[in-house]
Amino acid sequence: MKQTVRDFDFGGKTAIVRCDFNVPLDGDGRITDDTRIAGALPTIEYLRGQGARVILMSHLGRPKGEPKAEFSLAPVAADLSARLGAPVWFESVPAVVDDGVRAKSASLAAGEVMLLENTRFRTEEDAKDLSVQAPFAKELASLADVFVNDAFGTAHRHHASTAGVADYIPAVMGFLIEKELKFLGEALDSPKRPFVAILGGAKVADKIAVIESLMQKADTLLVGGGMVYTFLKAQGCEIGDSILDKDGIAFAGSLLARAEKEGVKLLLATDVVAAEAFSNDAPFEVYEAAPPNGVPEGRQGLDIGPKTTEAFVREIASAGTILWNGPVGVFEMPNFEKGTRAVAEAIVKATESGAMSIVGGGDSAAAVALYGFSEKMSHVSTGGGASLEFIEGKKLPGVEVLNEK
């Protein structure tokens, strides 16, 4: 079991905290969604309350080692200052760490907070060669007495600021990572039955390991979104111009056979909403999705149909644990969001009736936020890629480096 911030005495100490402040910005550099900043506050406030001097660090976007104004964390510093009701020291230092930063970190008083510039302004941050990362990791570690990782969204990456720092100073997890591991761990290791997993997204190949893992753990798999057309193709169903993962057809076919053999309930869309073009204004119809029927040429599936929606909602209503990763349609378009909205509403109702619901980050989390349901789910993950790798059973570098209890 890994140590948390509760296992360390921060009195008189300096903590360097890896957060996930990779927030969306508009063309004027304004933050359009500060959910990730809000998620970091419990750990920051706890450290301040414990008398720690707090140094925050994060990446933003993909500057690829080049300091660029549009990727500066300056907007995050301003947002944090307002939320904390206290100044957050920040200077846009291209090198991230320089003599000025070292002097400021050494002069911090208990409870004071500073934010470093975008860690990806340094090419060493995400270098594939860990020996190249090491000098930057050592620079970051030299600023503090303890490393706190609270960025679950990047915990699946071995970067200088997410894992390398732990080579030089003690490392513990913050409350956000602790919460993520608790919910995901319980869902996978000891779920309340029935365990229903809902999978969407575009490519089957991207989620092979996830699907194989859930085949061993879930009672029912509901497959929608873009990936369902690869499964339908494997069944011999016509899919028209719908998205197709050609490399995933064979796997989809083998998975259907395996589910039948092992008694796993795997439900595919039996009807879909297909349009003449990928546009909200395109004419659309509902088509049966079973051989020899399907989507005709010149049409592309953009949502699950009413029969499928009803079947999915029925399965969700009976669930004890629900894991949702990937919308079941193009929810960004009003004409093709009915399936995704119905799934989200069904999960909310099941949660209110005692089910544990976990939304696995990414587009699913975006859909839930759009509908105003985030607070009504048991847990909405902050890390799409990290949560997928955790479900696959992979070790997360940003967690593995933490001190054991």
Image (cartoon, helix red, strand yellow):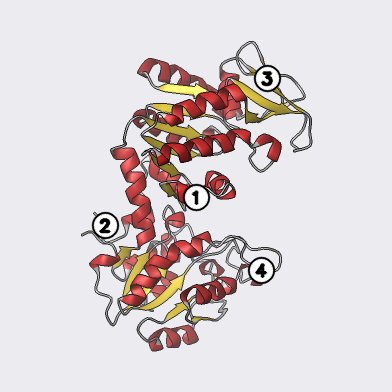
Query: Circle 1: is it few (<14), some (14-19), or many (20+) Cα within 10 Å?
Result: some
Residue 391 is left or right of residue 333, and the answer is left
**Residue underneath mark 4:** 29
Marks 4/2: CA–CA distance? 37 Å
Badge number at residue 244: none
| Image spot of residue 342 (x, y percent) | 56, 34
Amino acid at circle 4: Gly
Is disc 2 surrounded by few (<14), some (14 to 19) or many (20+) residues within 10 Å? some
- The amino acid type, in three-letter code, at marker 2 is Lys
Residue 258 position by quadrant: top left
| Labels in figure, total | 4
Q: Which quarter of the figure has residue 54?
A: bottom left
Whether 47 is drawn above or below 373: the answer is below
For disc 2, the marked residue is 2
- Image side of residue 248 versus residue 189, left or right: right
Q: Between residue 92 and residue 250, name the one nearer to us.
A: 92
Residue at figure coordinates x 30%, y 76% from the top left: 50
Circle 1 sits on which residue?
A: 374
CA distance separating discs 2 and 3? 51 Å
Q: Residue at x 69, y 22 (%)?
A: 286
Q: Position of residue 101 (x, y in %)?
A: 47, 83
Q: Residue at x 26, y 61 (%)?
A: 3
**Which image quadrant: the N terminus?**
bottom left
- How far apart are the two marked residues, 1 and 4, measured between alpha carbons? 25 Å
* Callout 2: SS: loop
Location of mark 3 (residue): 287
Give how far apart the Cα atoms at labels 3 and 4 are: 44 Å
Q: Nearer the viewer, mark 3 or mark 4?
A: 3
Secondary structure, mark 3, is: strand
